[in-house]
Image (cartoon, grey):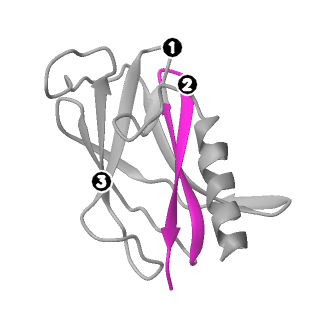
Amino acid sequence: MFKSFLLAAGLVLASATVSAQQSADCPLYFPGSELCASVEFAQAPTESADSPFVLKVYDHTSTASAPALVDPAQMKVDLWMNMGHHGHGTSPVKIEKQEVGTFLISEAYFVMPGKWLIRVWINGEKSEMTVVVKP
């Protein structure tokens, strides 16, 4: 029990060192553009089928109750799995604009269970988040 508590406390402290701008309100932060992005899955990602998700890009400085969605000048998305001293990605994902600042990411194949990174580049800056794919 005590070891579990220490591990949890360590994780909290480690996460506190992440950029002050990156938070639940801004899961992917791009400081040079002052933009944020979020990822929303309709269903949990799986290794057995396409796992599409919606990526929303919004202005971090927006003062409105709902953040202002914006279209970045450049955007790239890929999926990556670190495996110790090496890693691998998947085939390129398909990015389709749905409306201003909202993009459907499809052909997202997480080819094995484990921790995957969704890596996003906006206007040349990279940010990433981890998703867990269960068998």
Residue drawn at x 47%, y 43% as measured from the top left: 77
Which corner quadrant holds the N terminus? Answer: bottom right
Q: Is residue 33 above or below residue 40?
A: above
Residue to which mark 2 is pinned? 125
* Residue 32: assigned label: 1
Q: Is residue 97 above or below residue 5?
A: above
Q: Secondary structure at mark 2?
A: strand
Q: CA distance from mark 3 to mark 2?
A: 21 Å
Q: Main secondary structure of the magenta part?
A: strand
* Label 3 environment density (alpha carbons within 10 Å; few <14, some 14–19, many ≥20): few
Residue drawn at x 54%, y 35% as measured from the top left: 127
Which region of the structure is painted magenta?
113-135
Do labels 2 and 1 touch, CB within 8 Å?
yes
Residue to which mark 3 is pinned? 40
Query: How far across and down, in percent of the image, does residue 66 sit?
Result: 15, 28
Amino acid type, residue under disc 1 in the picture = Gly
Q: CA distance from mark 3 to mark 1?
A: 24 Å
Q: Secondary structure at mark 3?
A: strand
